[in-house]
Image: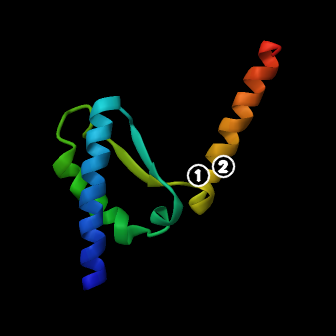
Amino acid sequence: PVALASFERAARALAAGIAATATLVEIDIAVIGGGVGKAGEVLFAPLRKALTEYATLSFVQRLAVAPARMGTDAGLVGAAAAALAGRTDTAVAGV
């Protein structure tokens, strides 16, 4: 019960942050990666429920939340992709 309560509290805090960010930048999906994303439905179920309370503006109400497909490697893969994109841009520019 204590662990589940901790996940619910974390989900509410995460939902507040996601809803605020989505309101500012109008995103359609929030992808949760790393170890947090591997928590599964013990986190995602209360997160989705809390989002209905925090995401009240019409354009944020359909916000989806999903675990990263890359799991704990999501950050590394994203960093590598950004580095490759930067290299490609430099090569294309002839620099």
Q: Amino acid at mark 2?
A: Val
- Is residue 66 placed above or below 27 in the rendered structure? below
Mark 2 surroundings within 10 Å by alpha-carbon count, few (fewer than 14), some (14 through 19), many (20 or more) = few
The residue that mark 1 highlights is 75
Q: Point out the image quarter for the N terminus.
A: bottom left
Q: Quadrant of residue 57?
A: top left
Residue count near mark 1 (Cα–Cα under 10 Å), binned few <14, some 14–19, many ≥20: some
62 and 56: which is toward the camera? 56
**Numbered-mark total:** 2
Residue furthest out toward the bottom: 1
Q: Residue at x 33, y 42 (%)?
A: 63
- Viewport quadrant of the C terminus: top right
Residue located at (53% from left, 54% from top):
68
Helix, strand or loop at mark 1: helix
Residue that badge 2 annotates: 77
* Image position of 90 (left or right of 5): right
Which secondary structure lies at badge 2? helix
Q: Residue furthest front?
A: 95
Image location (x, y in percent) of residue 44: 36, 62
What's under tag 1, amino acid-wise?
Answer: Gly
